[in-house]
Image (spheres, rainbow, N blue to C red):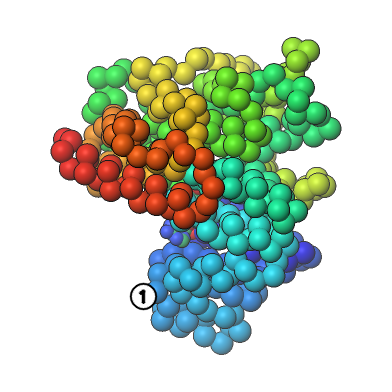
């Protein structure tokens, strides 16, 4: 099998690299990264990749130098990233963070490759288009989010029309028990203290605000084609159950596992088979108890906003994600407060609702990109007047 990894130097990328390194029956085609060219070069050498691509033109020389004499081809920039996704391969890991992950995923599907999709933003911004593109090319999309991989696995051998509800779990993040007054003062360092998962900076903060869960509710709707009312999120602080599927007879199938993304990645890599994976086995007696609580939309408005976005559909997902990315940048940059992120996203959606094509059906990548840009501009303008 031939594989490519987009976003190889990130958290999901490193976990994918770890699994690939343990296999001698897989050929690596392309690896891509950002500014960490030293690590990208190391990975490319270790996996004997055909090609290494940095997303940044100004990193080309450094990458070229780091790979001198290795036989690995080097390229840089957005066009090169797209070209890399067109290189013949069987399996592509989509692990770039943010809306930038969308285009390479489309190209991978267009060549009929299996798309292992960690980049949830692809489904949030352009779900119907992405699913249609996969169908057109008879290509598979395999979910690589722990919750969605869990749902996918619980559905093996089942008929989706018999599904009554899907419940995805949320750890609740570091602020699960914080009051609204405390949340108003939450710092970046505090938001980075995820209780169970080690992840990239952006998704870690999104987990603290529950924006990550908000994206995942939309991701569930788009991937499994369910009605919003069928999709629920429940807080489960131990992160042992990743999701549950409820059927019309009242039975629920839960997926349990250690919080290690190598499970979801490995499942997608080995699908439809199962193979040994280097993940911890659960000791249920030691875990002792699993607990659940309802999420609080008052303290975590992201969940309420995602319900609105699921109902609106159209380009609302693209606007929601773009506004959220700007809000995240503004929080990381110290421009707005923690709770300001949800406020900014809500105000951006409201403002776009009144005077734009937010709810037009998503028919082309171009209109998704246009909404993405419009929402970013709008969010930046609103953020400039927030404290
Ligand atoms: P990360 O920040 O650790 O890594 C992101 C990768 O993308 C890096 O290789 C970086 O160089 C590259 N990248 C960033 N911006 C880019 C751009 N504009 N163009 C090209 N490349 C760019 O992120 P992560 O935590 O690995 O998350 C990756 C994706 O997987 C996200 O969509 C995230 O929501 C999803 N995801 C992550 C986890 C997790 O455990 N980390 C779990 C589920 C889903
Ligand atoms: Mg997840």
Q: Is residue 114 visible?
A: yes
Give the quadrant of the N terminus. Answer: bottom right
Q: Residue at x 59, y 37 (%)?
A: 222
296, above or below 140, in the image = above
Would you name the residue on which mark 1 appears?
Answer: 58
Q: In terms of image quadrants, where is residue 158?
A: top right
Residue at (22%, 40%) from the top-left corner?
383
Tell me where residue 301 appears, x and y as whole percent. 37, 24
- Residue 15 location (% of width, % of height): 59, 53
Residue found at x 35% / y 20%: 299
The crowding category of the residue bearing disc 1, from other C-alpha atoms within 10 Å (few below 14, some 14 to 19, many at least 20), is: few
User: Could you tell me which secondary element the residue under label 1 belongs to?
Assistant: helix
Q: Is residue 17 found left or right of 156 in the rendered image?
A: left
The answer to whether residue 227 is left or right of residue 305 is right
State whether residue 107 is above or below residue 250: below
Q: Residue furthest bottom?
A: 69
Residue 358 % position (x, y): 41, 38
Which residue is more in the foreground, 159 or 336?
Answer: 159
Image quadrant of residue 241? top right
| Res 259 seen here | no
Q: Is residue 326 above or below residue 240?
A: below
Q: Could you tell me which residue is drawn at 60 percent across and 62 percent down? A: 107
Indicate yes or no: mark 1 CB to ligand 1 under 8 Å. no
Is 381 situated left or right of 76 in this image? Answer: left
């Amino acid at each position: 099998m031939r594989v490519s990894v987009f976003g190889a130097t990130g958290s999901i990328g490193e976990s994918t690299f770890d699994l690939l390194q343990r296999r001698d029956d897989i050929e690596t085609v392309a690896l891509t990264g950002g500014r960490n060219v030293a690590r990208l070069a190391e990975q490319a050498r270790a996996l004997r990749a055909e090609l290494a691509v940095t997303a940044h033109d100004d990193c080309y020389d450094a990458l070229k130098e780091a790979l001198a004499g290795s036989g690995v081809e080097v390229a840089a920039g957005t066009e090169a990233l797209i070209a890399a996704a067109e290189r013949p391969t069987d399996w592509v890991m989509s692990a770039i963070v943010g809306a930038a992950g969308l285009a390479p995923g489309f190209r991978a599907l267009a060549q009929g490759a299996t798309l292992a999709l960690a980049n949830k933003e692809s489904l949030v911004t352009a779900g119907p288009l992405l699913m249609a593109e996969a169908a057109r090319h008879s290509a598979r999309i395999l979910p690589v989010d722990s919750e969605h991989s869990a749902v996918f696995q619980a559905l093996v051998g089942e008929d989706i029309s018999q599904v009554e509800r899907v419940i995805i779990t949320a750890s609740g993040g570091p602020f699960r028990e914080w009051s609204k007054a405390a949340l108003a003062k939450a710092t970046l360092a505090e938001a980075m203290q995820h209780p169970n998962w080690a992840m990239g900076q952006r998704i870690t903060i999104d987990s603290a605000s529950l924006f990550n869960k908000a994206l995942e509710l939309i991701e569930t709707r788009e991937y499994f084609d369910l009605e919003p009312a069928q999709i629920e999120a429940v807080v489960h602080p131990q992160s042992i159950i990743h999701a549950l599927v409820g059927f019309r007879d009242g039975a629920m199938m839960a997926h349990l596992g250690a919080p290690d993304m190598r499970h979801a990645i490995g499942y997608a890599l080995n699908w439809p088979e199962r193979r040994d994976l280097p993940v911890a086995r659960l000791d249920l007696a030691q875990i002792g108890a699993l607990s659940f609580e309802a999420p609080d939309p008052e303290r975590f408005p992201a969940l309420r906003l995602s319900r609105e976005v699921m109902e609106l559909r159209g380009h609302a997902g693209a606007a929601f994600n773009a506004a959220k990315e700007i809000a995240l940048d503004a929080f990381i940059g110290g421009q707005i407060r923690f709770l300001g992120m949800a406020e900014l996203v809500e105000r951006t959606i409201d403002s776009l609702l009144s005077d734009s094509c937010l709810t037009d059906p998503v028919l082309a990548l171009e209109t998704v990109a246009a909404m993405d840009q419009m929402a970013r501009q709008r969010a930046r303008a609103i953020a400039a007047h927030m404290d």
